[in-house]
Image: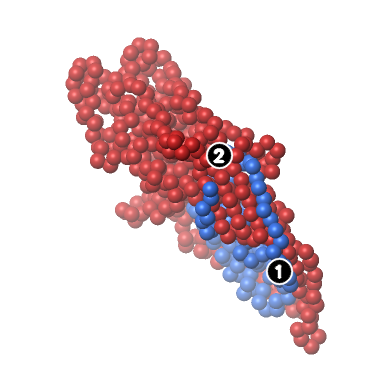
Amino acid sequence: MTAQPPQDPQGEQPPQPPTPGDPHEPSERIIDTSSGRPDGLNKCPRCGSTEIQYSLTAKALVCSYCRFAWNEDVAEQRFGLDSSIAELRGHTLASGTADVREDLTTVTLKCQGCGAEVVINVEQEMQARCHWCRQTLSINTQIPGGAVPDAVLPFLLTREEAVERIDAFAGKRKTFAQGRFKQEFVPENVMGVYIPYLVVDGNMHAVLRGTGEVTTRQYTVRRRVGKDQYVTETYYDADVYAVQRAFDLLVDDLTVESAKRFDADDNARATNNILSAVQPYDTENAVVYSSHYLKGFTSERRDLNVRDVDAEVEDKFLAIARSKATPTISRYDRGVRWDEEGVAVHGSRWVSIYVPVWLYSYADSAKGEGSLVHYIAVNARNGNTMGSVPVSHPKIFAVSCAAGTVAAVLGALAGLAYMFM
Amino acid sequence: MHPLLAEIAADPSVAMLLADSGDGAAGIAFPFLAGPAVFAAVYIGIYRYYRNTDKRHEFEKKTDVAVGNLRSGDRRVGTNNRQRSRTMSGQNSTDHLERVRRIRVE
């Protein structure tokens, strides 16, 4: 997770080619990103209170007693996740990416204040109040339930700013919106949600092979098609080339969804592509996990492991390779058809992260269970807004018919003019 | 330009309609081509503007990537003459998400 200056594929200062890793080197390395605190009390560093909440005004954790404000360290720097991508070998996994245990639903916390034992449902929340001494108890360790990431990107946009953006987005799409949506649209119902992503760095070598064509001649031929009718046709001659490109790629902070229900390619139940479209996130600024950041927001548990998304990530690496090869094939004016592609990943680094989204969800109340959930989402770091508004098909049909009819009439007039000219 | 008009203008059927007017087709066909094409363009344009089904994060272009050590191996293998199309058949250099045969790379 370190910023590398992008270079032109034909640039003059390419990074050193990766050499195959030492066979004696371990192929998997774990970086411990735990906070070091035991479960239980997570105190204010100044006064020792556990009444702490993330403040959107201060953009920091704020102690409710002494008003001390602070943020956790930036995770990249604290855990050395910003070391050079070119030096990555094998799998480097931050400890928050460990395989998820589906059976882990409750954790018993021992209150260090009074000794009471408090059971917490970690599928729902990461904090609970001790029922004896009223102190706030937190999950501070990386329990393998998928709910504790390596790092958190805190919210920057306030609820009011998000409501304004969602209102403006939907306001531009009222004319042909479904009637019930217009009646039931209440942007104030927006929720602050932390969505889990896996962030991947990769050091790889890519090879692409295909065929390209260069135009060598363009000419027109006049051909007789009737007694006195001729048509003019344009033809192209081309040289055909076998094309190959091989290059090294250092990919920095590729993000991939790590909760099944937010899979960007599955829009059957919800418009998940909307959540993908509000990216990017400044993942390099993510801070070390603390459950205090989650208080007042909802968070989705990670339920996909590294090996579940490994193939998807390799496809994404290949897509990046194809995209980066484009400037190198500009001489092929008739295009290139890639037939074969491959990538050798010499090293990768995986970090789990929570990103902040203000999310407005709408499901048609008349359709009941199973109705498509429409999202309007606001990236709570940079304000990118995208959404899906349910449309009224009869209204679009009517206006399209009207436009089609006008076009047909104009076409008829143009046709008549064409025939009698 | 209004975003809705931009969506409609970007629709391929609109370009098809405009192209039709110069290809020598009989004038009688004009209304039968123009009507359905504009109907489809307006319907698809409004639907996309509201539902944004085509929107996604273009990770292949927006992810921070350093590229280097490029090696090209191009050689001429023949000719393809007297072609009607301006572009080669099967051209996929801009379809970055379309996967092709996977090869093993060392």
Classify residue A405 as left or right of residue A362. right
Contact, mark 1 vs mark 2 (Cβ under 8 Å): no
**Looking at the picture, how far across and down is residue A189, in whole percent?**
39, 39
Residue drawn 40% across the image and 24% down it: A54
The type of residue carrying mark 1 is Asn
Where is A119 relative to B84, above or below? above
**Looking at the picture, how far across and down is residue A61, in whole percent?**
41, 21
Q: How is the image coloured?
A: by chain
How crowded pointer 2 is (Cα within 10 Å; few <14, some 14-19, many 20+) is rated as few
Name the one closer to the observer, A51 or A411.
A51
Residue, far bottom: A227
Among the chains, which one is blue?
Answer: B
Image colour for chain A is red
Residue drawn 69% across the image and 43% down it: A10
Classify residue A355 as left or right of residue B66. left
Where is A125 relative to A61, above or below? below
Residue at mark 1:
B80
The type of residue carrying mark 2 is Thr
Residue at mark 2:
A19
Dot in front, 1 or 2: 2
Name the one closer to the observer, B35 or A153.
A153
**Looking at the picture, how far across and down is residue A377, in whole percent?**
46, 42
Visible residue check, residue A406: no
Name the one closer to the observer, A287 or A361.
A287
Where is A77 relative to B83, above or below? above
**Looking at the picture, how far across and down is residue A319, in whole percent?**
55, 50
Report the quarter where the C terminus of chain A lies. bottom right
Total of numbered circles in the picture? 2
Q: Do the dots labelled 1 and 2 sit on one chain?
A: no
